[in-house]
Amino acid sequence: MRKIPIRSRRCTQDGTFFNPGDIYLSALVEQKDAWLRQDFCQKCAEQLKPQGHFWKGVIPEKETVASPEDGSLIAVFKKFYAQDHQQSFAYLFALYLERKGIFARRGRAIFEELQSGEVFHLQPVEVKPEMARQLSEILEAHACPSV
């Protein structure tokens, strides 16, 4: 599994630091063994014709401290994400975290953790009731709120 780099603190093209409230464009380019992520300020993004996966975002107005519950949920998600045989649960869980406002979807199968800027690429799956039931059981076992 290839890791996607977190959002940069400055524009790839002109080096401008991002400030709270700034609009940015992130582009992912798939390379042989890794993802290349480039983040552009709004001014530079207007001159680009991005290829591959890309999305716009806004730098959060202020860094908020994640609640202990959020940290627990993210930790459980990362356990799923790290295991190839758990990718279907990771996708379902990413949808749950998106609904809770912890993740934002940046494409059909790309999710960004809003607090850290960490990005996860997942294979979409058809969500079946049995999967939701199993995920609820897993969440209960990890003392997280159920789906």
Image (spheres, rainbow, N blue to C red):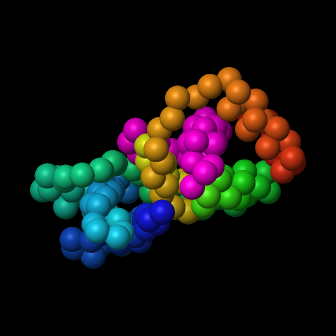
Q: In the displayed structure, would residue 139 be above or below residue 48?
A: above
Q: Choose top left, top right, bottom left or bottom right for residue 129.
A: top right
Q: Is residue 13 visible from the viewing direction of this image? A: yes
Residue furthest toward the front? 85
**Horizontal and vertical percent for residue 61?**
52, 55
Q: In the displayed structure, would residue 100 be above or below residue 81?
A: above
Identify which residue is drawn at 12% across, 56% down: 47
**Horizontal and vertical percent for residue 86?**
63, 49
* Residue 49 is inside the magenta segment: no
Identify which residue is drawn at 51% across, 35% down: 125
Q: Is residue 62 left or right of residue 22?
A: right
Q: In the displayed structure, would residue 15 be above or below residue 54?
A: below
Identify which residue is drawn at 40% across, 38% down: 108
Q: Is residue 67 left or right of residue 62?
A: right
**Horizontal and vertical percent for residue 81?**
59, 55
**Horizontal and vertical percent for residue 72?**
76, 55
Identify which residue is drawn at 14% across, 56% down: 48
Q: Choose top left, top right, bottom left or bottom right for residue 64.
A: bottom right
Q: Choose top left, top right, bottom left or bottom right for residue 8.
A: bottom left
* Residue 88 is inside the magenta segment: yes
- Number of dots carrying numbers: 0
Magenta residues span 84-108
Q: Magenta stretch mostly in which secondary structure?
A: helix
Q: Of residues 111 and 63, which is closer to you in this image?
A: 111
Q: Is residue 11 left or right of residue 142?
A: left
